[in-house]
Image (cartoon, coloured by chain):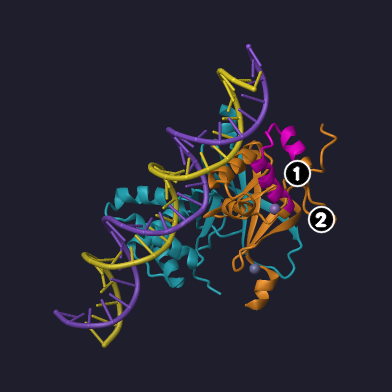
Chain colours: A cyan, B orange, C yellow, D purple
Amino acid sequence: MVTNMRAQTKLREKTDKPWNLDEIGQFLGQQGIRPSFHRLKIFEYLINERTHPTADEIYEVLKKEIPAISRATVYNTLRLFFDRKIVQVLNIEKNEARYDATLTWHGHFKCLLCGQVYDVEIESLELSGLDNYQVLEKHLDLKGLCPSCSHKK
Amino acid sequence: MVTNMRAQTKLREKTDKPWNLDEIGQFLGQQGIRPSFHRLKIFEYLINERTHPTADEIYEVLKKEIPAISRATVYNTLRLFFDRKIVQVLNIEKNEARYDATLTWHGHFKCLLCGQVYDVEIESLELSGLDNYQVLEKHLDLKGLCPSCSHKK
DNA sequence: GTTTAATATTGTAATGGTTACAAATATGAG
DNA sequence: CTCATATTTGTAACCATTACAATATTAAAC
Ligand SMILES: [Mn+2]
Ligand SMILES: [Mn+2]
Ligand SMILES: [Zn+2]
Ligand SMILES: [Zn+2]
């Protein structure tokens, strides 16, 4: 059991402080991932912004600060993070993979108008008929109109 | 309220009889969809097999009986069915869309080994924080190993 | 039945997110 | 510093899906 570790990826709360690069480096190290600068920045973006970005959104943002960064590095790094189980991949929409460093069980709502992806708290869920099934991933995905887009309409 | 209509797409039960082409034609007509032969056969496959096929799986199967059928027709028809809300699209996996003519609320389990997609009954689900959100689609997607693949392993 | 307009189907080219890959660069142990 | 290993890069390839224009079919109008 790890004790001296930054509070793990839970749903964002008002009181949450952003993770700094030192904390992230420590965290990646603990997961057996060499904390290169690019990896630090990519994980920093995921854990502090929590907007469920696509690979390309991360690339476009980081390019401003790190002009030499390559799209391939972003894709490689996200796949590494997923393989090491420190991020989850969201397939709400089939034409785009989104990434989420929050691993506690929660759902997602994607607004069909503005495209934003919101976290959804799951109070309870009961399934049946899954005896002898080995469940490795669970995703609850909603689509519709967010409050502000619902208004505009 | 439609009364003289074939029992709507509910979860498959042991007692279910397959739909015949007449019933399907009637159903498509009621939905404002001209029941061309291709459309009948595509819907027939979805509603009677219920294997959550991809567009390409449908194409490969129907090609045996209708050698002249085009992949584009399968894609076009599936999109039409989705727009008219008589099928749902599953994005469990990002690289493949699967289609389901069962519209009652249920979840899906995809086996990462054999690739089969199973229906999952949802006993209950409680969400919070969705006030003023207009929910148009709900998907519960699980991944893991199905009983027989779990064994083999 | 013939003409005409609307709809459905087809084959193929284009799209776009992602992956593969080989070359270049950076890192770290000895 | 030197060598082996790991990381990053740029670009080509992949592949499911979509776009599109041509062809075929259907249904209505005459
Ligand atoms: Mn989330
Ligand atoms: Mn189903
Ligand atoms: Zn919105
Ligand atoms: Zn299986």
Residue B31 shown in magenta: yes
Q: Which residues are magenta?
A: B24-48
Residue A16 in the image: above or below residue B148 = above
Residue B21 is labelled as 1
Image spot of residue C12 (x, y percent): 42, 45
Please state which of residues B66 and B138 is positioned toward the viewer in this rendering: B66
Please state which of residues A115 and A129 is positioned toward the viewer in this rendering: A129
The amino acid type, in three-letter code, at marker 2 is Glu
Q: Quadrant of the N terminus of chain A?
A: bottom right
Residue B132 shown in magenta: no
**Mark 1 in CB contact with mark 2 (< 8 angstroms):** no
Residue A47 in the image: above or below residue A36 = above
**Picture quarter with ligand 3:** top right
Overall secondary structure of the magenta section: helix
Residue B29 is labelled as none
Q: Residues within 10 Å of mark 2 (few under 14, many from 20)?
A: few
Q: Quadrant of residue B30?
A: top right
Q: Quadrant of the C terminus of chain A?
A: top right
Residue occupied by mark 2: B13
The amino acid type, in three-letter code, at marker 1 is Leu
